[in-house]
Amino acid sequence: MIKMAIDKSSSYKVQNIVATTSLEKPIPLTKLARTQPNTEYNPETFPGLVLRVKEPKSAVLVFSSGNLVCTGTKSVSQVRQVIQAVIKQLKKINVNITIKPKITVQNIVASGTINLKLNLNFLALEMQNTEYEPEQFPGLVYKLVEPNATFLLFSNGKLVCTGTKNRAQLEDSMKQLLKNVKTALKNYKK
C-alpha cells in the first residue's frame, strides 16, 4: 500500500479496511465448512463462518443469509478481489451468485505520523474530545466529530486513525488533526 503524505509533516498508510456486502442468496455454511479447507465454523459459539483468503490476505465472515464482512484488505480493489474469491469457492458447492455485489466500506484503519514530539498531557487539556489515562494506556484518544474519526496519538508523533469510510474522509481527518494539534502546540509555546 502506498504511503500518503498530507503535508511535509505527516503521512499515513491504510492498514485495514472493513467492508460488507450481500450476495442476496442463502449460503449453506455447514456444506461450505465441510468442503473448503480454509474455513472455520462453530455455530454454537458464533453464527458466521470464517473463510480465510490467502491473496490478498484477508478473512471473510460468511453468514447463512448471504451477508459477508471482509477484513484485512488495504484497498477497495482488494476487497473486490476477496469477494470474487469467495464467490468462486461458493460455486464449488453449487451456489451460483449472479449479481454484482455492492461493497460498502464500514471502517478504514490507518497508521501514520505527524512528525512532531507531542506533550500528551498538554494536548489532553488543550484539545476537546480527548481521553488520556497514561497509567492505563500510553496513547491519547482524540475524537473528531466531522468527519467521524478517532485517533490514538503517541508522544513520538505516531498515530492510528479509525472510523473513516473513504480516502477523502481519511485525508480530511488527518488535515484537521494536524491543524488542531498545531493550534494547541502554538498555545503551549506561548
Image: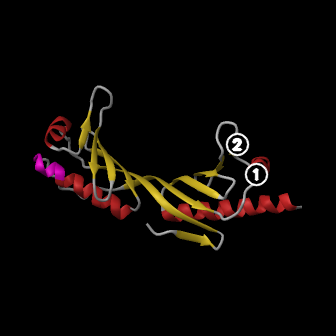
**What residue does disc 1 label?**
123
Magenta span: chief secondary structure: helix
Residue 123 percent coordinates (x, y): 76, 51
Residue 110 percent coordinates (x, y): 52, 57
Asked which secondary structure carries label 1, the reply is: helix
Amino acid type at mark 2: Tyr
Q: Quick check: marks 2 and 1 in contact, CB under 8 Å?
A: yes
95 or 36: nearer the eye?
36
Amino acid type at mark 1: Leu
Q: Quadrant of residue 29?
A: top left
Q: Quadrant of the C terminus?
A: bottom right
What residue is rendered at 64% in x and 74% in y?
A: 8
Q: Which residues are magenta?
A: 89-94
Quick check: 31 above or below 76? above
Residue 49 percent coordinates (x, y): 27, 39
**What residue does disc 2 label?**
132
Q: Quadrant of the N terminus?
A: bottom left
Residue 96 percent coordinates (x, y): 14, 51
154 or 101: nearer the eye?
154
What mark, if any, has residue 104 been given in the picture?
A: none
Q: On the picture, is 29 further left or further right than 11?
A: left
Q: Residue furthest bottom?
A: 8
Q: Closer to the N terminus: mark 2 or mark 1?
A: 1
What residue is rendered at 57% in x and 54% in y?
A: 160
What residue is rendered at 64% in x and 41% in y?
A: 137
